[in-house]
Amino acid sequence: MTTRTQRADRRTEALSKQRIVTAAIDILDEGGEKALTFRALATRLATGSGAIYHHVADKDALLKAAVDEVIARVTTGTPGDGDPREAVRAVALGVFDIIDARPWVGTQLSREPWQDAALRILEGFGGPLAALGVPEHAQFDAATALLGHVLGLAGQYAAAARLLPPGSDRNAVLSTFAGRWSRLAPEEYPFVRRMADRMPEHDARAQFLAGIDLLLTGIATTP
Amino acid sequence: MTTRTQRADRRTEALSKQRIVTAAIDILDEGGEKALTFRALATRLATGSGAIYHHVADKDALLKAAVDEVIARVTTGTPGDGDPREAVRAVALGVFDIIDARPWVGTQLSREPWQDAALRILEGFGGPLAALGVPEHAQFDAATALLGHVLGLAGQYAAAARLLPPGSDRNAVLSTFAGRWSRLAPEEYPFVRRMADRMPEHDARAQFLAGIDLLLTGIATTP
DNA sequence: ACCTGAACACCGTTCAAGT
DNA sequence: ACCTGAACACCGTTCAAGT
């Protein structure tokens, strides 16, 4: 007899892992890693903090699920049957752009070795590498090297972005650091100082891609 | 008149940033990142937790100083005047081995973009790259790509090592993950599954170095 | 079975009080 | 100036009590 009122009562909609992960992603996007607490999550879901543990093991599992969901969107995009080199670049840039847009993904990927999200990226490189004619025994080294570049450099830019006001873009980040580098001791850091002068004309995304291309060239040249 | 007793009283030795950082490194080595708390640090230094703040701004600064000290030991080793390729490999492997021995360094390097430690590594690559005849405009891309590989892949192995009992070595880590990968869905992860079968015969350090060599080949081939 | 929210066992950091 | 250590403002996680 009370069925008629249920439809309007959105707040008591059943909790689920999916709803929790979605809310967690929203909080991470809005306020960064620091903002994601079980109390904040419970408030947003209009429930008690303990309720979350009925659907998610702990905070680590929650972060893993959030990263996995976001990464899956890039790697499940059809690779197409075009140039395999372009397919590799597309996967790499896809992950780079995700990390750029959501720095918390970069942080988490570094902490989650060989977990679901990293495997998806690895898998995304595998097909194109085979299509490129890389011998099977060399495919694993090639794929892990590409993964390493993606996680390492994209993660660095993500961490840099975290230090600056959320509004500022990639190149502003680089410029800020370039200024800092110019003031280093010339005897200790001759190379870094020299490079600092070139920074302003550099584009972070292009630089990331240059690394991918160096690897692709190395992969194509190595027998 | 109380001067005679001072020599034996080691516990009241003056606090200093150096002493604090050394103690922090010891705690990190013995118990990992979780073990480093200001309370544990204060206990080891036989002082109050608040005293630490007279010498170190906060926990972040403490971790930065600890990583910087450890990384400086590798990059300040004389690069020698031998093969520049070998010099690049030596820097990369040096950092890899540090991260392997102290997983907390890997975690921290991912969180500290373009800070002292990362700059030291970058600088370590700079000299050899110039010696290799890499044109100046390409040196920065090359150095950052090498840095990305070091931070990305070495960090992954470090994080993996953290998940296993502290005794187990690199290859045991890989074998454990290989077993897990073999049980993945074949339609979703054909590449990763295929690679899992090759894992047992792989050496993590060699695989890391293979990536460096791919980059070096790419760098040498790119005009 | 699922949810609630107070309670527990921690943190990093601050600060009045001491020397 | 430096140190002490209790106090503060948080955490993640647990668990008796409710539905």
Image (cartoon, coloured by chain):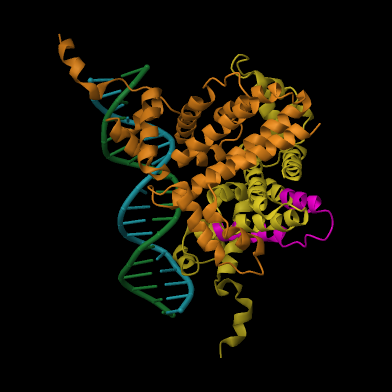
Chain colours: A yellow, B orange, C cyan, D green
Q: Is residue A164 left or right of residue A84?
A: left
Residue in the picture at 69% in, 51% down: A95
Q: Position of residue A214 (x, y in %)?
A: 74, 39
Q: Position of residue A74 (x, y in %)?
A: 72, 57
Residue positioned most to the top = B1
Q: Position of residue A215 (x, y in %)?
A: 72, 42
Residue in the picture at 67% in, 70% down: B187
Main SS class of the magenta portion in the image: helix
Residue positioned most to the front = A223
The quarter of the image holding the C terminus of chain B is top right
Tell me the magenta residue range: A64-93
- Residue A85 part of the magenta segment: yes
Residue in the picture at 59% in, 32% down: B89
Closer to us: A192 or A42: A192
Q: Is residue D2 left or right of residue A26?
A: left
Q: Is residue A6 left or right of residue A92?
A: left
Looking at the image, is A1 positioned above or below residue B182? below
Residue in the picture at 74% in, 48% down: A93
Residue A219's image quarter?
top right
Q: Is residue B217 left or right of residue B12?
A: right
Instruction: Kindly tell me whether residue B136 is visible in this rendering.
Output: yes
Residue B38's image quarter?
top left
Instruction: Kindly tell me whether residue A159 is visible in this rendering.
Output: no
Closer to us: D14 or A93: A93
Looking at the image, is D19 positioned above or below residue B110? below
Looking at the image, is B1 positioned above or below residue B139? above
- Residue A97 part of the magenta segment: no
Residue positioned most to the bottom = A1
